[in-house]
Image (tube, rainbow, N blue to C red):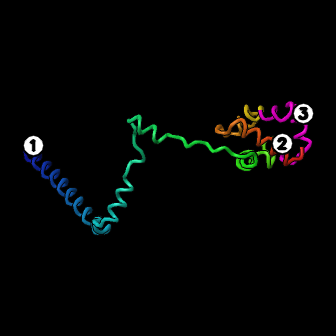
Amino acid sequence: MSANNDQNFVKTVLGVIGALVALTFVILIIAALLTGKTPTDAAALQKLQTRVEPIGHEITDPEEFKKLTAVAPHTPLAGDQVVAQVCSACHGAGVLGAPKIGDKAAWSARKSAAGGVDGLATSAEKGKNSMPARGGRADLSNDEIKAAVQEMLKQTGV
């Protein structure tokens, strides 16, 4: 009797496995019918290729790395350009206590406390309170910083 039970068990298990395999094929066929054909035209394949491309790649050649990281030479800016591009972001609105361009009293006090234009320029080069060194533009030269300080003083009337 035990052999008969074993045979029934094996038949049942094989029947369930067969039914699951058949169901899998039915689901695959239905999915293929619902999603349509596989893209074979060049545009669809290119779009697919673009989607699966890696985001980046490693550079192991030092010469290639030097080419990719080369920095363009800095073109010197006039004082008014530095003020417009860098300084006015904070000094235009008085952000975090920065003296506003046009506030004659604040600029006069800072100028005399710093020892003149050179002192203000040195302060701007090193950074002061919340202002980062060189206004956050490390590529600015000392002459550009000084020209910007002079321009802000000129615009303020100091």
Q: Is residue 60 above or below residue 8?
A: above
Please state the horizontal and vertical placement of residue 147, each as a whole percent of the image: 76, 41
Q: Is residue 58 magenta?
A: no
Residue drawn at point x = 42 percent, y = 45 percent = 56
Element marked by disc 3 = helix
Other residues around mark 1 within 10 Å, as few (<14) / some (14–19) / many (≥20): few
Q: Residue at x 70, y 49 (%)?
A: 85
Residue 10: percent from left, percent from top: 13, 48
Please tell me whether mark 2 sits on a helix, a strand or a loop. Answer: loop
In percent of width and height, residue 67 lies at 45, 41
Q: Earlier in the sequence, mark 1 or mark 3?
A: 1
Tag 3 residue? 112
> At numbered mark 1, what does the secondary structure look like: helix, strand or loop?
helix
| Residue count near mark 2 (Cα–Cα under 10 Å), binned few <14, some 14–19, many ≥20 | some
Main secondary structure along the magenta-highlighted residues: helix
Tell which of 125 and 30 is nearer to you. 125
**In the image, 56: left or right of 90?**
left
Q: Which residue is mark 1?
A: 2
Q: Amino acid at mark 3?
A: Ser
Name above or below for residue 83 compared with residue 132: below
Residue designated by label 2? 99
- Range covered by the magenta-colored residues: 99-121
